[in-house]
Image (cartoon, rainbow, N blue to C red):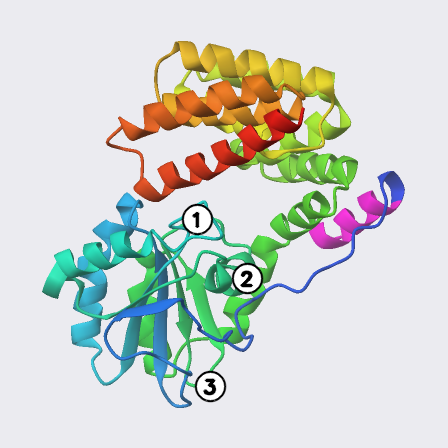
Amino acid sequence: MNLLAASALVLAIHAPAVAKRPYLNIGDAAPALKPERWLKGTPVSEFRRGEVYVVEFWATWCGPCKQNIPHLTDLAKRYQGKAHILGISIWESNDPTSTSYMKRVEDFVKSEGDKMDYIVAADGPKATVANAWMKAADEGGIPTSFIVGKDGKIAWIGHPAQLESTLSQVVEDKFDVASARSKRAADVETVRPIRQALEQKSYRAAIDLIHEADTKHPEQSRMWDYDLLVAMFHAEPPAAMKRADAILADAQGDIGAYRMVVSIFASQKDLSRPTYVYGRGLSTKALAKNEMKYLFLAMDAEICSSLGDTNGAVKSQEQAVEQAEHDTHAPKDFVEFLKKNLATMRQKAVKH
């Protein structure tokens, strides 16, 4: 029995059925490319038949993405007339209503000059392009590259480190798309049912599927920490608390581990009160480390809000804004996002 069939069996026995959603795979027609703004080069309004395109997703805050810029520029020169190279900036903002981040992206592209010598565009605040490509393909990290073949279909999806060898084969009509499609389907069949279960709030199903994935691929167990905790804090809060404590202890109090765990209580709005109380305790411990304070204060404000403590939420959010304004690492658009949240929290506090 393959993993997908086994997953279906687990769902049938242990939890409500989780409906399948389509996902973007190799061999599927490339989605439309409609960024918020084209920043450099000739805009690509459509994928013309007989031509090859590389679409790489990146962000100004992503170190590995920026390190790959010279490589893309080199590919654009060597494959001129054979392939179009595109870089699409995504996930630049936390505010779905503001395009204030656009100037930062534009300024970065201008500052790169000829070092970034290929077609560049930026996605809008609602992540239209990112959702149509990255989310649809179950890709959660950048940089990620897509190759669109001469037939207008996705020929390959993967990390830029493996891009060039594949690109040459696609250009020369030597790449086995069918084999790549089958391999990718096998790779993502572990991920898709878990993501679907979480999206549909079938948390016990998600827990079972993650444990099954753990059993089959124990070397990848840490990649499921966040998803498993999200599911467990909904379905098994006491067990989730023990697991979170163990993760933090194993990380020896690393601030990144605290950020991962505390973000759950800030983003999930349907947890139990004892769970939020526990989360507030972790937030307090993280703040005592005096690292990334504006982020943890903002998350603390969200937790206070979920606890019904509107005044506490306003206080933490005010402190988050103050810290962010004096932190050179805080993106300006994120500071504005914090201010908008503060205004909303103040209105709620007045009503109470």
Residue visible at 47% across and 27% down?
298
Q: Give the mark nearest the N terminus, 1 or 3.
A: 1
| Along the line of sight, the residue nearer the viewer: 8 or 40 | 40
Q: Nearer the viewer, mark 1 or mark 3?
A: 1
Numbered tag placed on residue 141 in the rendering: 1
| Along the line of sight, the residue nearer the viewer: 179 or 288 | 288
Q: Decide: few, some or many residues near mark 1? Use Cα within 10 Å; few <14, some 14-19, many ≥20.
A: few
Predominant SS of the magenta segment: helix
How far apart are labels 1 and 3 at the CA level?
27 Å
Quick check: marks 3 and 2 in contact, CB under 8 Å?
no
Q: Give the mark nearest the N terminus, 1 or 2.
A: 1
Q: Is residue 67 magenta?
A: no
Q: Is residue 214 visible?
A: yes
Residue 120, position as x, y percentages in the image: 28, 67
Q: Secondary structure at mark 1?
A: loop
Residue 57, position as x, y percentages in the image: 37, 59
How far apart are labels 3 and 2 at the CA level?
20 Å
Residue visible at 58% across and 39% down?
217
Q: What's the residue type where badge 1 is placed?
A: Gly
Q: Secondary structure at mark 2?
A: helix
* In the displayed structure image, the side of residue 212 where residue 185 appears, left or right: left
Numbered tag placed on residue 256 in the rendering: none
Quick check: marks 1 and 2 in contact, CB under 8 Å?
no
Q: Decide: few, some or many residues near mark 2? Use Cα within 10 Å; few <14, some 14-19, many ≥20.
A: few
Q: Secondary structure at mark 3?
A: loop
The answer to whether residue 112 is above or below residue 258 is below
Per the image, the residue denoted by label 3 is: 151
Q: What span is colored magenta in the figure?
A: 1-12
